[in-house]
Each structure stands twice: as structure tokens, then as C-alpha cells.
Amino acid sequence: MAEINSKISYNSEEDILNISKGKGSRASIEVGEFILDIDSNGFVSALEILNASENLGIEKNLLNEVKKAKLSILYKPNYLLIWISFNLKGIEKEIRIPLTIDLGHKKVERQEMVVC
């Protein structure tokens, strides 16, 4: 599902990638070099990745060119699995980020969005 106000941005000086649904957040949770903004329903509204080039295994010059990505999140009790798919110069790159964190989800739920 596409979110109207969703966006992706990259700051090459700070090496920070931000993916946002453009919605407000109730809380921010830091898990290592990943910062999750959580909405009032317990879903991720934004994801910030510090040291993005290193954590994603993508060179800074390629991250600068990212204009579109697909973000998928699988919510399980005590666990999140985040997939980010990029199309970089015609090559599809998928990153998986497993995070052990409890957002209060009692059943398995999936969230997808295309970010521009």
C-alpha cells in the first residue's frame, strides 16, 4: 500500500537514511543504530538508520541517488522483521533488519509501503 505523504531522505554528511510515512509518532525507540518512530497504534511511522552506508552495505553515492524504496514490516509478538528494497541503478537490493522489540502486537501483522 502506498502512503500519500511517505518519503525517503538521505543525509550524506551524517550518513543517515530516513524513511517516513509522514504521520505523527507517539514514541521513538532506539535499537542500536536504528531509531523507530511508533504511532499511537503501535506501528512504525518512521525508520531512521544511522551509519546507513555501513549498516545497509550500500555506498554513500548510491544512497544519495535513492528516490524510491519499498518498506515491509512483519510484526510478531516481541519481534519485528523489516525489509527495505531499493532499485539502485537498475539493480534490486533487499536489506533485512531483524529487531527484537515488543510493540504490543499479539498476532502476526504485515505493513507495506512504497516510499518516494
Image (spheres, rainbow, N blue to C red):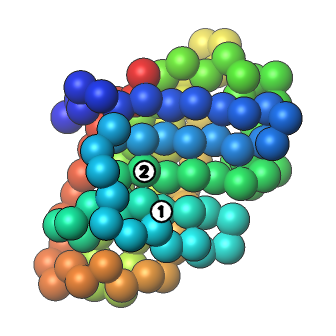
Q: What is the quadrant of residue 21 in the picture?
A: top left
Query: Do callouts 2 and 1 mark residues in contact (Cβ within 8 Å)?
Result: yes
Task: Point out the image quarter for the C terminus.
Answer: top left
Per the rendering, the mark at residue 36 is 1
Q: Residue visible at 48% across and 22% down?
A: 68
Residue under circle 2?
46
Give the image location of residue 24, x and y in percent. 30, 51
Identify whether 16 is placed above or below 100. above
Mark 2 to mark 1: distance in Å?
A: 6 Å
Q: Residue visible at 33% across and 38% down?
A: 22
| Residue 113 seen anywhere in this rendered image of the structure | yes
The three-letter code of the residue at mark 1 reads Leu
| Residue 57 seen anywhere in this rendered image of the structure | no
Give the image location of residue 86, x and y in percent. 55, 30
How many callouts does the rendering have?
A: 2
Identify whether 43 is placed above or below 105. above
Give the image location of residue 31, x and y in percent. 59, 74
